[in-house]
Image (tube, grey):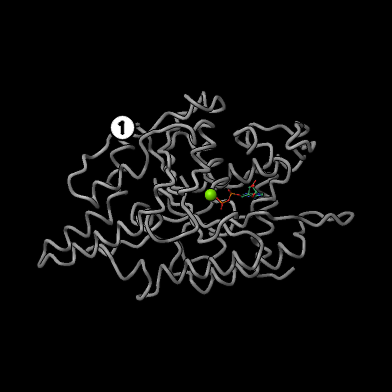
Amino acid sequence: MNSAISYIIDRQYDIVNSAPEPLPIPKFSTYAVCNLRGGIGKTSLSFNLSYEADDCLAVDTCPQGNLSYFYDNLYFQNNTTTVKDLILPYMLPGLGKASRVAKRVSASNTHFSQKNTFYVASTSDLYTLPSQMSTAINQAKSISGHQQAVAIDSMLYSLRDEIKREMTETETKNCLIDTSPFFSGATHLAWHATDAIIVPVRTDQQSINSLNLLLDTLSNPASEFRREMPSDGHTPKIQMVVLTHCAWSTAGGARNIPNQQTKVYVEKVRDIVNRNIQHFTTDNPDNHIILLDDFLGSGRISSALSKPISVLEAGDTMRINRVRTTVNESVEKIKAELKYINASIW
Ligand SMILES: Nc1ncnc2c1ncn2[C@@H]1O[C@H](COP(=O)(O)OP(=O)(O)O)[C@@H](O)[C@H]1O
Ligand SMILES: [Mg+2]
C-alpha cells in the first residue's frame, strides 16, 4: 500500500471496528455540503447526517428539491414557503421578509419522530435566482461610497442572516446546507452562510475535476465567488472531503484493502488536499479525508422509504421497481462511518 494513504485506510478500519477518537478538527455549527457536480452523494450525506446530529436545521438550496422530498414525500405537491422566500426580499425591495419558515421533519417523516430536526424546503424557482442576484448586485454598484458595500454585504449575507434567525426560532444548534451542482445563486450564498464546507467526492474522474473546480472557485481572484466579496472578505474553509461510493477488495483473506478504483481515488484526493491544504481547517491532510462505503441496496431502500441508513437493518428487503433489493451486511460499516463523521464535525 502506498504509504501516503495507509494512515487513512488504517483509520477507516478502526472507525468500523473500534470507534476511535473523533478527528482533531475544529467544530463549527454550520456546514455547506457542496461539490459542483450531481449524483455524488451531497443530498444522501446531508439527509443522513441531519439524522445523526442531535438537533439540526437542514436547508435545501438545490432547485431539484431532493432533500425536501426525503423529509416530506408530499413536497412536490405542496405549496409552501421556501428558501427562496428567505432570500428574495434582500434582492427585490418591497417584498416582506419571511419568518418561521422551517418545518419540523417529524411532522412529515415518522423516522424522525424522536429527533429535533427542522428543514427549510427548496423550490424549483431557485433556477431564476442567479439572474435576479446579478441584477440586484449590479444595481447596488451604482450606489456610491460606503452604502455600496452595505448593500452588497446585505445581499451576500442574506442566507446567513436568515439561517441564523431560523436557528434561533427552532432552537437548533447545528445546520447543514445541501447545495446544487451549480455555483451561481444559492450555492454562492451558501458559501457566505457557512462556517465550513464538506465536499463529497465520488470515486470517479469527473468528481476529481469538480473538486478542482471548487478549489479554483474558492481561491482564484477572477472566480465568481472572489469577484464579489463582502467587506470582511469572509471565505469558508473545507472541513472534510468525503470519498463516496468506496468499495473494498473481496479477495480471499483481504482485510481492509480498498479495491483498485477506491485506492486510486484516495491517492488522487490525498494529493489534491495536500497541495491545497491552506484551504482546509487544519494543516494535516489526513484530518480531512473520510471514506464512505458504497451504499448499494441500502441506498436504494433508504431513498425509496425516505429512511435514514442508521435505522436500516442488514437483511431488510423490499421490491423497488419490481427488483428485489436487500440491505447488505455492509450497512453496519456505513452506520459507523456516518457516526464518525457526525462525532468529528460538531
Ligand atoms: N457512499 C455513498 N454516499 C452517498 N451516496 C451514495 C453512496 N453510495 C451510493 N450512493 C448513492 O448515490 C446516489 C447519490 O445521489 P445524491 O445524494 O442525490 O447525490 P447529489 O445530491 O450529489 O446529486 C444515491 O442514489 C445514493 O444512494
Ligand atoms: Mg442533491
**Callout 1 secondary element:** loop
Residue depicted at x 24% and y 52%: 91
| Amino acid type, residue under disc 1 in the picture | Arg
Q: Is residue 197 left or right of residue 332?
A: left
Q: Is residue 316 left or right of residue 286?
A: right
User: x%, y% of residue 308?
Assistant: 60, 35
Front residue (pair 27, 295): 295
Q: Which residue is mark 1?
A: 100
Q: Is residue 320 left or right of residue 178?
A: right
With respect to residue 159, does 150 lie above or below?
A: below
User: x%, y% of residue 316?
Assistant: 75, 31
Front residue (pair 51, 81): 81
With respect to residue 216, does 335 lie above or below?
A: above
With respect to residue 52, does 35 lie above or below?
A: below
Q: Quadrant of residue 319?
A: top right
Total marks shown come to 1
Residue depicted at x 34% and y 37%: 167
With respect to residue 272, does 60 lie above or below?
A: above
Front residue (pair 116, 181): 181
Q: Quadrant of residue 200?
A: bottom right
User: x%, y% of residue 109?
Assistant: 53, 27
Residue depicted at x 76% and y 55%: 248
- Which residue lies most toward the left here? 145
User: x%, y% of residue 203?
Assistant: 66, 61
Mark 1 nearby-residue class (10 Å; few <14, some 14–19, many ≥20)? some
